[in-house]
Image (cartoon, grey):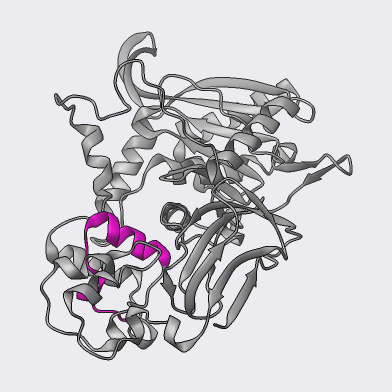
Amino acid sequence: MSKYVFKLPDLGEGTVSAEIVSWRVKPGDTVAEDDVIVEVMTEKAAVEVPAPVSGRVLSTTGAPGDTVPVGAELIVLDTEPGSQAAPSSAAAPPAPAAARAGANGNGVAVAVAAAVAAPPAPAASARVATSPAIRRRAHEAGIDLRQVSGSGPNGRIVAKDLDAYVARRGAQPTPLRSAPKAVPSARPAAPGREAGAVEEIKVIGLRRLIAQRMSEAKRNIPHFAYVEELDITELESLRSHLNGKRAADTPALTYLPFLALALVRVLRDFPQCNAHYDAERGVLLRYGAVHLGVATQTPDGLKVPVVHDAQALSLWELAAEMRRVSEAARSNKASREELTGSTITITSLGKLGGIASTPIINAPEVAIIGVNRAVERPVVLGGAVAIRLTMNLSSSFDHRFVDGYDAAAMIQALKECLEHPATIFLPA
């Protein structure tokens, strides 16, 4: 036996420890080099840690929720050749028993090999080359990745390959696990879910980090909320017109790119709202560039991907970039740079936006702009009652550094831009 002790590596940016979110392997499993063995959470981001060598797992350190310091023992592997009988090293066509042994520690679709009749494949194809995020999507959609052709380097499956396969199959890669939530069931509750039962859910990983940061922001920042109603009838007319002119392969515009473009414009006159407060140094940092955070709901919780240098983008470019970083966050493909550095954040619940809300500031920022639902309402216009499309902006400001007058003035300037959308495009 040849033991290889793998210690938690330095994950960058001053990280001294990481919380274990989930193990993808267990003692007795065989892993190949670069297989994901564990997902950990640092103060910056979730990180999937790959195996440095191939071998059989002898032991792991820590359970989900435990914190492991950098440099501490994480996993011990037996690297003797005979212990690495992973599916990727098998030269002969797999028998059913061998196929069952091919379920690797990260629970991807190769685990169903024994249940699917398929022609014998070359050994190199037993281990599909792709990212953990794509493995997760395929697993949730019930897709065997061995049936997907990869267009990346060395046949690696990339996102567009999975999308193309799904389109040919006539299904969408949405998580099957979400379907039962939409259909009420008349069956008896599962064991442990009867009336009066209590389910314990350990708060770990991203959810723990979200809870911690939300608590700190609400506790440390004196929030000042300001809600204003907008008449967006003209904005909707412009949006519909532009959507009617767009190319067939271009997604339709939502209200958010218009809001982002208007926000970039008004922040020139309200730089105190495009800022960070460095509490350790007692310094307020006002930014000339607008790095726009876009609050995004993901299966793992709320994330805030960032459109960097939003002031340099056109309406369509803003729309495309906001969509790109949001999709990257949802699929766990966003880089650390794409999840950090925002100077002001916008948040929207879309059709669930309600009448008003009180968004929590994304520290160390000092302002957040919230969008509520757009609805038709009767309003008095020119002495007569008319039906107009209206929407509320619900915003919060750090009252230590943004006075109430300045907060109100900024929202009024934003209101004017959105109610008269042609002004958004005028030269400064």
As drawn, 359 above or below 422: above
Residue 160 picture location, percent across and down: 30, 70
Tell which of 278 and 113 is nearer to you.
113
Residue at x-position 55% and y-position 42%:
204
Residue 130 picture location, percent across and down: 38, 73
Residue 161 picture location, percent across and down: 28, 72
Quarter of the N terminus within the rendering: bottom right
Prevailing secondary structure of the magenta residues: helix
User: Quadrant of the rendered structure where residue 336 is?
Assistant: bottom right
Q: Residue furthest front?
A: 1
As drawn, 124 above or below 306: below
Q: Is 155 left, or right, of 358 in this rendering? A: left
User: Quadrant of the rendered structure where residue 40 is?
Assistant: bottom right
Residue at x-position 58% and y-position 51%:
427
Q: Is 113 left, or right, of 39 in this rendering? A: left
Residue 120 picture location, percent across and down: 16, 84
Q: Which residues are magenta?
A: 132-151
Tell which of 388 and 169 is nearer to you.
169
Q: Is residue 246 visible?
A: no
Tell which of 367 and 257 is nearer to you.
367
Is residue 410 found inside the magenta-colored segment of the image?
no
Total numbered badges shown on the rendered structure = 0
Residue at x-position 31% and y-position 54%:
251
Q: Is 28 left, or right, of 395 in this rendering? A: left
